[in-house]
Amino acid sequence: MTTGVPVLLLPGMICDAELWRDQVAALRGHARCIVPALDAATTETMADEVLRSAPERFALAGLSMGGYVALAIMREAPERVTRLLLAHTGARPDTPEQSAGRQAASAAVKAGKFDRVVERLLGVTVHPSRLADALMLQRIEAMLRRMGPEMFVRQQLAAAGRPDSRPGLGEITVPTCVVAGDADRVIPPDNAIELAAAIPGAGLTMIEDCGHLSPIERPDHFNDVLLRWITG
């Protein structure tokens, strides 16, 4: 039987529990891990659905879009969260350019070009030094394809419509850890710096030589942070 505190691990866009495979293993004996699916029209609705099935009290970690949902949970039910980890994410809403990019990507997928979108995602998501790591890329690609084009379009729409989370950051009072990759090209590390500066007492860990998916790219480094966070 898995023991320990319940911890919700919220995946990024078109990611599933595979994103957290190494973390679930690392937390065995320390936490009871739950990886919810994020499939709704808005990040607020995703938060509602997560809360509906979550334990009464839990630790909360979110990566990328999962971080947007985690911040929505902090607005809606902060009393249920015991500690917070935000990885490769930010509090800002989309810029017009980012919204246009999401629309273009969604249009390409609807036009039958999901393969091309997956290829582009693989090229920008991981650190350039790992583009030759065939096994890692196969692992990520399989996850993206498992989630599929329809999920990609739904989650793009949800992410594009998320609110500005910055006004509420100062009200977060639980122990908070912010994690970023120093070479993240999807959500640049200045977003993490902003989060850590705005959340009272938050710590910031910048993982070197890392892109957007540190739980897969640098699992040992990420797990060190995760274990300190969950046992602190």
Image: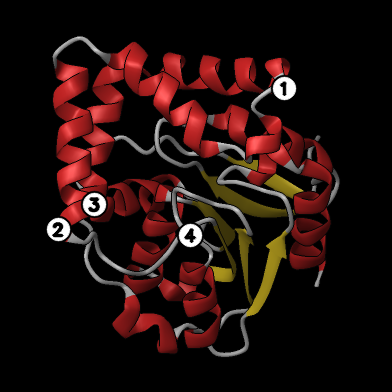
Q: Which numbered marker is on residue 98?
A: 3
Residue drawn at the location 33% of the way across and 73% of the way down? 75
Vertical position of residue 224 compared to residue 39: above or below: below
Amino acid on which the number 1 mark rests in the picture: Asp
- Pinpoint residue 221: horizontal percent, then vertical percent: 81, 52
Question: Which of the two discs, 4 and 1, labels the residue nearer the N terminus?
Answer: 1
Residue position marked by numbered label 4 in the rendering: 188
- Look at the numbered disc 3 and give the secondary structure of its residue: helix
Residue located beneath label 2 in the image: 96
Q: Earlier in the sequence, mark 1 or mark 2?
A: 2
Q: CA distance from mark 4 to mark 2?
A: 17 Å
Query: Is residue 94 visible in this depiction of the protein?
Result: yes
Q: Secondary structure at mark 2?
A: helix
Q: Secondary structure at mark 4?
A: loop
Question: If you read the primary sequence from the N terminus, does the residue marked by circle 4 or circle 3 appear first?
Answer: 3
Q: Are marks 3 and 2 in contact (CB under 8 Å)?
A: yes
Query: What residue does disc 1 label?
Result: 133
